[in-house]
């Protein structure tokens, strides 16, 4: 039994190595349990028995790799997910953002965009949207295209409306989209300040001069080592006193950032970078 | 019953409809010196997760925590799945969460926890299915048994909702009936009470 498990782990390593060599995507620091589920799912879908059978497939069939990439990038998301976080953002961070003439916000791992549009609505209601530039990035090109379109399933709007209310929405959620066929198209003024871009956290550099970074439910897929590397990069992308928000089930506890940030809301995982005085 | 020398490193519990009461009863009977970690997936609505932790804290003498990503599993602690996330166990015995599609219409899914925990704990895992109205967990429980672990299922007559126990009994029996005990909630509580971590 143990032997089987070892062989399987070995197969996974070989498979990931093949992907890395062939396509430059390094998944070796992704959290293994979830990664294994993804691989097994692909195995089932393709009617194969052993993980090692995926190796020739991925080496010779680029379409297969794209499918796997899609399996790996889990883009499940919602508008105003964790509404109380957005409420706290309004109450505890917005006033501080108001003091800046220009604001830069980065949504890391924006998936299909629901979180970014939620932010745009909040900023609009707080009178900040016009002076903000929002960067929304992901390594999944397909989900970025969907995000750019900004059309979401109509039947989800009722739940989103509830979340919007809980998030402290000050107007009516229906003002922000027009219903067409079975899709809800977000109003274009929300999109004007958003730039969608491809960015891979494993291989690409950070941005600079950010006032606020949201990276929610992305770190959970990484092992601690990769989490620390990414968090360090995000920390460096922030201005002094800039804000970092991670998912409410994620943590800075074991990362080097713990000493560099103060908690604005410890439960909702909202942090502020400490002011550091440079000597000399 | 598994023989007295078959001891465990961890317990996983899957429960759905009727779970608040069933978990309360199990918690009430855990002794102070209970050393194993217990990981629980309770199907629940979004936003309810703090509520479940608080509910169990009232009835448990050992620690109860909400499962958080990368937190490592400690002895004598009950971990409760967070609403809206799958709960998994990593090779290094730390917890992992994932936002993903539902499995068996559920997130968290019992199958997902049971599969990953049995990969890590193998024969030293005890899997328990309690009352519930879905078939989630039966495949995972069979997987635990396949990997040499042991299965307890609340007897259908004793459960508030018998769908989940019936499905679990069927799935495990198809794999290895010798590794299964069907017990009342009170008997499961006694079974847990008598557990201690094995010496290596
Ligand atoms: C579950 S979604 C989170 C969406 C949103 N932030 C939320 O919390 O609702 C995770 C996203 O992380 C992205 N992701 C995973 N690994 C990545 C990487 N290495 N670089 C960039 N994005 C990544 C996935 O493509 C996916 O869209």
Image (cartoon, rainbow, N blue to C red):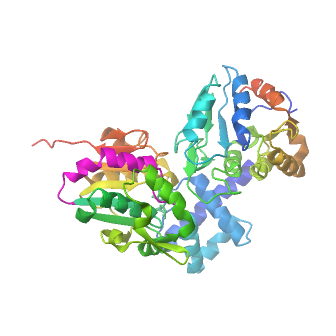
Q: Quadrant of residue A254?
A: top left
Q: Nearer the viewer, residue A31 or A166?
A: A166
Question: Residue A105 occupies which quadrant of the picture?
Answer: bottom left
Closer-to-camera residue (A17/A174): A174
* Magenta-drawn stretch contains B159: no
Q: Residue at x 31, y 64 (%)?
A: A134
Position of A171 relative to A55 (above/below): above
Residue A109 shows in the view: no
Q: Quadrant of the C terminus of chain A?
A: top left
- Residue B193 seen in the figure: yes
User: Residue at the left extreme?
Assistant: A280
- Say if A148 sits above or below A237 in the image: below
Residue A80 belongs to the span the image colors magenta: yes
Name the spot of residue A249 as percent of width and height, x first. Answer: 49, 45
Give the residue drawn at x 60%, y 41%.
B93
When the figure is inspected, residue B187 is found, relative to residue A23, above or below; the finding is above
Look at the image and give the residue range highlighted in magenta: A76-102
Relative to A7, is B157 on the left or the right? Answer: right
At a point 85% along the width and 51% down the height, the residue shown is B171
Q: Is residue A171 left or right of residue B185?
A: left
Query: In the image, residue B110 lies at what x, y percent?
Result: 70, 48
Nearer the observer, A137 or B15: B15
């Amino acid at each position: 039994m143990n032997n089987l498990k070892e062989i399987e782990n070995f197969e996974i390593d070989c498979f990931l190595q093949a992907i890395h060599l062939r396509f430059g995507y390094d998944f070796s620091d992704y959290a293994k349990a979830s990664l294994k589920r993804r691989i097994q799912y692909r195995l089932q879908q393709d009617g194969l028995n052993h993980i090692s059978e995926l190796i020739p497939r991925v080496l010779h069939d680029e379409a297969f790799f794209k499918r796997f990439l899609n399996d790996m990038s889990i883009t499940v998301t919602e508008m105003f997910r964790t509404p109380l976080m957005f409420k706290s953002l309004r109450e505890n961070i917005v006033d501080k953002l108001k003091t800046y003439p220009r604001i830069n916000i980065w949504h890391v791992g924006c998936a299909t965009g629901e979180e970014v549009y939620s932010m745009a609505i909040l900023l609009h209601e707080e009178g900040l949207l016009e002076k903000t530039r929002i960067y929304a990035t992901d390594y999944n090109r397909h989900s970025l295209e969907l995000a750019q379109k900004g059309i979401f399933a109509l039947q989800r709007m009722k739940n989103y409306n509830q979340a919007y209310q809980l998030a402290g929405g000050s107007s009516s959620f229906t003002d922000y989209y027009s219903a067409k066929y079975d899709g809800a198209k977000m109003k274009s003024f929300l999109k004007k300040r958003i730039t969608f871009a491809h960015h891979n956290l494993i291989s690409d550099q950070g941005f600079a001069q950010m006032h606020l970074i949201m990276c929610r439910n992305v770190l959970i897929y990484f092992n601690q080592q990769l989490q620390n590397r990414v968090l360090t990069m995000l920390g460096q992308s922030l201005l002094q006193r800039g804000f970092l928000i991670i998912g409410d089930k994620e943590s800075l506890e074991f990362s080097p950032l713990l000493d560099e940030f103060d908690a604005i809301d410890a439960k909702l995982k909202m942090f502020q970078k400490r002011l550091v005085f440079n000597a000399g | 019953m598994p023989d007295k020398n078959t001891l465990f490193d961890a317990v996983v519990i899957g429960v759905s409809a009727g779970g608040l009461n069933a978990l309360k009863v199990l918690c009430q009977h855990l002794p102070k010196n209970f050393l194993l970690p217990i990981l629980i997936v309770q199907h629940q609505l979004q936003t309810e997760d703090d509520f479940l932790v608080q509910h169990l804290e009232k009835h448990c003498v050992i620690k109860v925590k909400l499962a958080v990503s990368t937190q490592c599993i400690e002895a004598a602690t009950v971990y409760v799945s967070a609403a809206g996330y799958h709960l998994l166990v990593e090779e290094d015995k730390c917890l992992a969460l994932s936002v993903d599609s539902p499995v068996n219409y559920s997130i968290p899914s019992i199958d997902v926890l049971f599969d990953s925990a049995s990969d890590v704990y193998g024969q030293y895992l005890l899997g328990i299915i309690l009352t519930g109205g879905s078939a989630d967990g039966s495949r995972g429980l069979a997987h635990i048994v396949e990997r040499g672990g042991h299965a307890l299922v609340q007897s259908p007559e004793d459960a508030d909702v018998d769908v989940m126990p019936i499905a679990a009994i069927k799935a495990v029996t198809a794999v290895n009936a010798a590794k299964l005990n069907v017990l009342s909630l009170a008997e499961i509580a006694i079974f847990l009470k008598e557990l201690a971590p094995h010496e290596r």
